[in-house]
Image: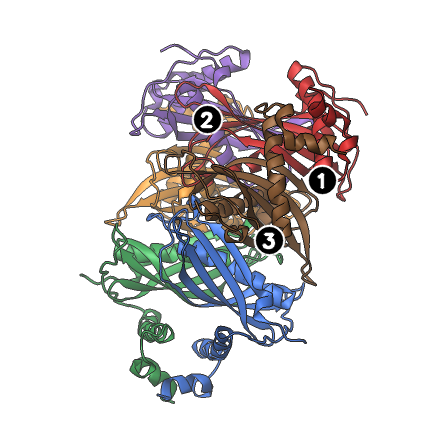
Chain colours: A orange, B purple, C red, D brown, E blue, F green
Amino acid sequence: MESKKPLESRTIMTDMVLPSETNPLNNLFGGELLARMDRAGSIAARRHSRRITVTASVNHVAFNQAVPLGSVVTVEAKVSRAFNTSMEVYIDVWVEDRYNGKRTKANEAIYTFVAVDDTGKPTEVPPLEPETELEKERFAGALRRKQLSLVLAGKMRPSDATELRALFMGN
Amino acid sequence: MESKKPLESRTIMTDMVLPSETNPLNNLFGGELLARMDRAGSIAARRHSRRITVTASVNHVAFNQAVPLGSVVTVEAKVSRAFNTSMEVYIDVWVEDRYNGKRTKANEAIYTFVAVDDTGKPTEVPPLEPETELEKERFAGALRRKQLSLVLAGKMRPSDATELRALFMGN
Amino acid sequence: MESKKPLESRTIMTDMVLPSETNPLNNLFGGELLARMDRAGSIAARRHSRRITVTASVNHVAFNQAVPLGSVVTVEAKVSRAFNTSMEVYIDVWVEDRYNGKRTKANEAIYTFVAVDDTGKPTEVPPLEPETELEKERFAGALRRKQLSLVLAGKMRPSDATELRALFMGN
Amino acid sequence: MESKKPLESRTIMTDMVLPSETNPLNNLFGGELLARMDRAGSIAARRHSRRITVTASVNHVAFNQAVPLGSVVTVEAKVSRAFNTSMEVYIDVWVEDRYNGKRTKANEAIYTFVAVDDTGKPTEVPPLEPETELEKERFAGALRRKQLSLVLAGKMRPSDATELRALFMGN
Amino acid sequence: MESKKPLESRTIMTDMVLPSETNPLNNLFGGELLARMDRAGSIAARRHSRRITVTASVNHVAFNQAVPLGSVVTVEAKVSRAFNTSMEVYIDVWVEDRYNGKRTKANEAIYTFVAVDDTGKPTEVPPLEPETELEKERFAGALRRKQLSLVLAGKMRPSDATELRALFMGN
Amino acid sequence: MESKKPLESRTIMTDMVLPSETNPLNNLFGGELLARMDRAGSIAARRHSRRITVTASVNHVAFNQAVPLGSVVTVEAKVSRAFNTSMEVYIDVWVEDRYNGKRTKANEAIYTFVAVDDTGKPTEVPPLEPETELEKERFAGALRRKQLSLVLAGKMRPSDATELRALFMGN
């Protein structure tokens, strides 16, 4: 299959924080943001694979900044690496100041999606060819994260996770 | 502060999968399950801390099994370790067969919540004292996962993550 | 069919009161609580019958206590008596104090569900065998409530409602 | 306070059954209909009292007929009797055939609402003066239903429920 | 086909403004009102045609008055003119004062719906026969509005829009 | 005030069509799309004005193409002209083919928003300076549309609507 660029899967979802999505502090519920990121990431994976996609895992979502009621939130998703039938998607979340329009980074998340056919069976996806520096860095890290998932799930022995071992032993 | 048992924070949320929560394959959206787990985990953290709690991070959510429309889903959350102002919460998800009532494990997730006062400032929480074998195992793993988060966020040097190093070098 | 215990159908649904579910006084809408109790009761009836269940009637729901925004609410449902194809389900609602964790009873409701097959036709359910004192008391009252429903619906003559007559004439 | 007619509180809520409100048989969830009836009944009680109203109890809701996805449902609520600070509201539900437009009665429910001031304290409401035969019949039955609620809640001795005793002993 | 009266399609949808439907000023979102009007208008068009109806266009919706949280809003829709397979529907929106019950006009909108069969193909509808003065006036204006839509969509030459030309040249 | 470019207000909202948003033909409800467009347009107006914005009117929304369940829909909004305190916003809607990724234009809508301060009072907005050919064309048409709205609302005499008269008399 012909490779694709990260730009081809880029998905932008800008929306407001509505009153029904807030917690007792009047900030966006973590769970609501997880659901929005899942939808945006799923569309990015579909754009890369042209298949139905289902969420396989979520990793390393850090909620660094509260997002108040009425904020404008932009969720931006791009495929960061394609494996055989799965895709890692990087999701960046920006919040916009109402008065000066300045955007600040509020969250960063990594989801993995699997492409499936109409019966739900995993199916092959095109490889990803990163272009920018950031895309290349995320592409490289994806293998390390995949090993980590396998080790933590007990599906790979730590001694076989060569990329990871280097990280902890190298320096 | 006096320590608490995991059982004291146990939160059970049983509900159906409604048509508005399903994807084109008629299974529960990953994002919807993430939102339900966030609410259940947040209640568990509140029961442990008796404070407002906000989601700090999500780690290692694996979606192993599709959950079809109309299923009965049980989300069960328990605090697995308390740090200074944060709590790791383990969330187990069970799906129930409509005909024979057999429950099967569908998901497992780890969320971290921070206890805050009414102004949103982090505030101390009681220590956790695990009781069962499984609770003790999850308690032990929590430190390793915390180090991992710090390393991946660039807030701890890999060489200082002693618990993690042991994992990758030990065997 | 083999009888079942109330414990086998026990369903616990713990969740928060979200901003989208509140009235102008910032308390949970009665209608939202009715909908939650319906879902919990329907799951209990399904656990007893292992069938699709549809709501047949609702009786004697008293809203004794306002439930404020942000509260943790636990809805607990258990089958209280099984008739031929229908089940009476008792639903208890508890609200949890945010600061001391004390649970207080907020509501009590009685719903009736009918078990149906895939075409919607009523189908037989197992008998119920109560165990605790409270379960036995609710089991006994169920017959009186069934007669009352029939009388009020004009489907039974008051003079034939022997259980009810005893109540009003006995003392 | 000057009395009001039932017609002055009449509230009509016509809407469709949306996919998000249906059960696995593709019919309207009982719980959703309970929530719609609560909103319509609450508006009727507000129109009678010109106050904020809160749900006090629900009685004798019978679900006689399934309401399929896509149906047009009309909920019609009218105050049937006013007591000191509370109002009984009768709610009739009609379903409309898509092809010939014929309306059939699908449900009938009785809710009670209490009028409150801005602090949530119960406050007096105008008396109701029924006009039509049906309104007079429902007005008369309301006292019997109120006694029944009090007896069942253990707040009135059966021997004091004169209206009810007559029903069971009279013939 | 036999003609119908506007009254036969009249649809009344009274409901409250819920917290999940409000903007940062605590007023009903324009978008939510547009969705409510679409559902009410669609039911009116269905009552006229006894067919599935789909929204074809929306014209001239003016939001003259903010509708605050907790208001009672009545949306009233009636078919104002029937063309071959389409129907123009006039929608009036009223808001009710909580204290004195006075209704004031909040909005007025004009939607067009097309009647379709089960495959989505447009299908003929009965003609409309207006009765009141207001109905006759709206009936007359509908032709002018239809020409205007066609001109603005580039599907009719301005010189052929005789009704419209008269409006701008006549006086 | 310094003028702004249309590009500075551009708002992209990509999302899926969920089951809860579909009509009996399994296509996106017109009303749901109107609500999405309202949110996107409102964000574009806020980006131009850096103020809270409220919907003032909706004009000429044509639903040319059904949008099936599961589609990926992109709503793109840009300010097309700024008047004293109001902004006209053009909204284009694209649907994406699941298999070949081809985007087709599904809708086009024109909304008007007013910028308000925290008390809801209209407040001045920057002028708009169009750049591309399409932006210039929409900018020019906005005046004609504004006159049309005023004429139809009875707030301007047809003979004073010089831009409109030219349209109908000129050829």
Q: Is residue B80 above or below residue D141?
A: above
How many residues crowd around disc 1 within 10 Å: few (fewer than 14), some, or many (20 or more)?
few
Q: Are marks 3 and 2 on the same chain?
A: no
Residue denoted by label 1: C153
Q: Is residue D153 above or below residue D140?
A: above
Picture quadrant where residue A167 is located: top left
Residue denoted by label 3: D74
User: What residue type is disc 2 on?
Assistant: Ile
Number of dots carrying numbers:
3
Residue A162 % position (x, y): 46, 27
Q: Secondary structure at mark 3?
A: strand
User: What residue type is disc 1 on?
Assistant: Ala
Q: Secondary structure at mark 1?
A: loop
User: What residue type is disc 3 on?
Assistant: Thr
Measured Cα–Cα span from mark 3 to mark 1: 22 Å
Q: Secondary structure at mark 2?
A: helix
